[in-house]
Amino acid sequence: MRVLITGGGGFLGVKLAKALAAKGEIRGEPITHLIQADLFQPEPVEAGFTVEGLALDIGDRAAVDAAFATPPDCIFHLAAVVSGQAEAEFDIGLRVNLMGTINLLEAMRAAGNKPILVYTSSVAVYGGEIPDMIEDWTILNPQTSYGAQKAAGELLVTDYSRKGFIDGRGLRLPTVTVRPGKPNAAASSFMSSIFREPLQGEEANCPVSEDYPIWNSAPRTVVKNLVHAAEVPEEDWGQNRCLAIPGQTNTVREMVDAMTEVAGTNAAGRITWKPDPFVQKICDGWRAHLNPAKALRLGFHQDSGFTDNIRWFLEDDIRK
Amino acid sequence: MRVLITGGGGFLGVKLAKALAAKGEIRGEPITHLIQADLFQPEPVEAGFTVEGLALDIGDRAAVDAAFATPPDCIFHLAAVVSGQAEAEFDIGLRVNLMGTINLLEAMRAAGNKPILVYTSSVAVYGGEIPDMIEDWTILNPQTSYGAQKAAGELLVTDYSRKGFIDGRGLRLPTVTVRPGKPNAAASSFMSSIFREPLQGEEANCPVSEDYPIWNSAPRTVVKNLVHAAEVPEEDWGQNRCLAIPGQTNTVREMVDAMTEVAGTNAAGRITWKPDPFVQKICDGWRAHLNPAKALRLGFHQDSGFTDNIRWFLEDDIRK
């Protein structure tokens, strides 16, 4: 089985690549070749099969077609322009998030091998005037360009699957935290940095109020769910190939308290609390209370407390 | 005010053009120029202002940009590849319904005059595993490529409006019946032809069972609602620029009985009842029970019985 990860150089892409290297197979079929594609050629992970780093701009249709010269059997589509950047630079968001997804879908359709596609959508597809508990049948009413582009991609993933061009499954990811690395242009960037930086002795700012609730999931859980998504039998998906995966709702205060519980009081003292109206406005459009009933029925994994998020970050991203 | 109608040569486009000719203004601003654009250059309607027929393929980005050399102030976007054709010819559906909409949105954004856009979506955006009464917050879960492409366009209309690029408003039209003219490639084509042809002495086939319920609206009502959509104040739309407009639910049997009530028993006898599994499958994915609460709040018009649909068809399209 030939596997392609777009955004394969990002933190989630690398963690997913490592998980696939450890697992060695998808649906019982051995992985023979893994391509980690990203805008800049990623460092390939170590594995018992061939792993290749590929520089690929998914907004470039010809480049995407070239990458499908030997068609992958399973694609994890993680590449995206994040919310803050897509809001500030509309053209780039449209080009990568929507047109890039269409380029990939069209390349898969042309390849004709009905590959598995695991598409990453986001809780950012929810917003506006909708009931507070989000159910599987709640309208996608995004209040960011990122969310709108992701939601439009969802519709296409379901339609290409219904037509039999692909075997698609789309996951609306909660905010993934604690994310290793540097702050990025996502409006949600602070949702990792207020833990990541203080845990490493640095200051970080929280731009929203401490009672702000966040629908979140740990990278370990999200990676398990990405792999699980590829393995759920096609006939179990029903008439919508995209769903909200499980997460947990915590206020910023609860998350900070969990950090204190795991790592002591020093870290929390390194958080500054300077409000940022630009970030607060984007975040106010997001939702934190979801009932991911379908995902639970399909066996997706669930977090069990933010102390795990902190503990796993220390284990996976700091202490080794 | 300069007005553009895409699909301006279609039955709804022509009826809308005539309604605008009679009204003469939008939001109190006199219409000075009306462009009826369609794939083949339409015959312009008569009006007290300049009306021009324009051959325009909205799937052709350069052609769309050229049509915006003098930017319209108000665009009614009716052009589409209908459901049956978009299902049979995937490429053409994607090119016109999704890419054509993107081409128009991008041309409006580039024009920079924040035009009014009235976007026509469809009840075909609903389907799959959703509760039976469709509310304003029900997920769009289309089970046709036509519906998926329309729903993706909705997300962009709301996002371009939120960004201030356009003043968009999208209407999910019920099945519009009785439609004059010839049968077309829409799976819903029979929903007009089983009245239109028998009322003119010809046979027509009903490919679904007589208890099949149809969410429908008369052309007169739909045209009134398209004009109303342009005039609802922007601040009243809230955080989703697209909504289901009012319609009425009738079974095929009730609609045939209404025809008999208005026009006597001869017409109904000219309907044949040969099931068509291809059409039935598409229609089974559609929904017939909607609660268009937001549209009613915003003053959209409502039908009051299928006998009107029959009567108005005879008055507007046959007896003159």
Image: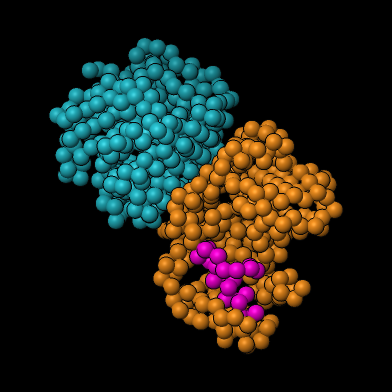
Chain colours: A orange, B cyan
Of B123 and B258, the residue lying toward us: B123
Closer-to-camera residue (B316/A35)? A35
Residue placed most toward the observer, B198 or A309: A309
Query: Please, is residue A17 above or below residue A311 in the view?
Result: above
> Relative to residue B3, is residue A263 drawn left or right?
right
Q: Residue furthest right?
A: A48
From the viewer's side, name the closer residue of B217 and A45.
A45
On the image, the x and y values in percent for residue A47 come to 82, 55
Q: Is residue B36 above or below residue A115?
A: above
- Magenta range is A179-200
Tell me what residue is drawn at x 57 percent, y 39 percent: A61
Q: In the displayed structure, does residue A80 sit left or right of residue B15?
A: right
Q: State the residue at coordinates (70%, 43%).
A: A116
Task: Identify the residue shown where x is 76% and y is 43%.
Answer: A2
Image quadrant assignment for residue B204:
top left
Residue B4 image point, x, y percent: 29, 34
Give the total number of marks visible in the rendering: 0
Quadrant in the picture for residue A218 = bottom right
Is residue B37 visible in this depiction of the protein? yes
Name the quadrant of the N terminus of chain B.
top left
Q: Furthest residue to the top?
A: B201
Q: Any magenta on residue B21?
A: no
Q: Is residue B133 visible?
A: no
In this rendering, the answer to whether A129 lies above or below B266 is below
Rendered location of residue B186, percent (x, y): 47, 26
Q: Is residue A281 left or right of residue A170?
A: left
Q: Quadrant of the C terminus of chain B?
A: top left
Residue A181, magenta (yes or no): yes
Locate residue A199: give its quadrant.
Answer: bottom right
Compared with A277, B5 (above or below) is above
The structure residue drawn at horizontal position 28% and vertical position 47%, both measured from the top left corner, is B113
Image coordinates for residue A128, horizontal then vertical, percent: 43, 59
